[in-house]
Image (spheres, helix red, strand yellow):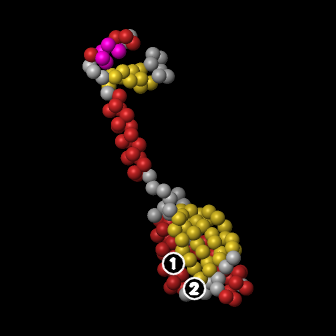
Amino acid sequence: MKLAAACQAAQNAHLDLVLVSENSNPPVCRIMDFGKLLYEQKKKLKEQKKNQQAQKVKEIKFRLHIDTHDYEVKLNHAKEFLGEGNKLRVTITFKGRELSHPEMGFELVTRITEDLAEIAVVDAPAKLLGKNINMSFNPKG
C-alpha cells in the first residue's frame, strides 16, 4: 500500500500509522492506536521488573571454637540461603587470645568451603581483616 493511501486509511479509522519494521524493504507499518501500544509496552516492562529479584547478600558468623551441632545448624542455614539464590558472606570472629592462632580460623574456613563445595563457588577468598576472617560464596548455576 502506498504511504498516502495508508495515512488516509489510518485517518479514516481514527487511528495512527505505526512503523513496525523499518529495516525491511519496503518498511512495514500497522494501523493501530499508538497510545495503546505505548501503554502495553510500559505494562510489559513493569511486569518484567516485578519478576526480577536483586541478589541479596546473607551473612553467617562463626566463632573459632564452635561445637559440631552449632556448626551443622549454621551450615544448614548457609545451604538454605544459597539454595534461594542469595550470595553468602562467612565471617569468623576471633576473641582475645584466639587471634594468636589464625591458622585455626583458616582450617575452619577450609572445612566450610569443603562442606559447601556441592552448592557454592568461592567468590572472594578468605582474608584476615582485623579480628575477623571474611570470605564470600556465590550459588552454583
Residue 19 location (% of width, % of height): 41, 23
Q: Which residues are magenta?
A: 6-11
Locate the N terminus by quadrant. top left
Per the image, the residue denoted by label 2 is: 66
Residue 122 location (% of width, % of height): 62, 65
The residue lying furthest to the right in this view is 100
Rendered position, 93 above or below 127 = below
The label number, if any, that marks residue 8 in the structure image: none
- Cβ atoms under marks 2 and 1 closer than 8 Å: yes
Residue type pointed to by label 1: Lys
Q: CA distance from mark 2 to mark 1?
A: 10 Å
In the image, what residue occupies the spot 32% across and 32% down?
36
Per the image, the residue denoted by label 1 is: 74
Apparent side of residue 115 relative to residue 85 in the rendered image (left or right): right
In the image, what residue occupies the spot 47% across and 22% down?
22
Rendered position, 104 above or below 51 = below
Classify mark 1: residues with Cα within 10 Å, few (<14), some (14-19) or many (20+).
some
Classify mark 2: residues with Cα within 10 Å, few (<14), some (14-19) or many (20+).
few
Which residue is nearer to you in this view: 124 or 107? 124
The kind of secondary structure the magenta stretch mainly shows is helix
Residue type pointed to by label 2: Ile
Q: Earlier in the sequence, mark 2 or mark 1?
A: 2
The residue lying furthest to the left in this view is 13
In the image, what residue occupies the spot 63% across and 72% down?
134
The local secondary structure at tag 2 comes to loop
Residue 105 location (% of width, % of height): 66, 80
The local secondary structure at tag 1 comes to helix
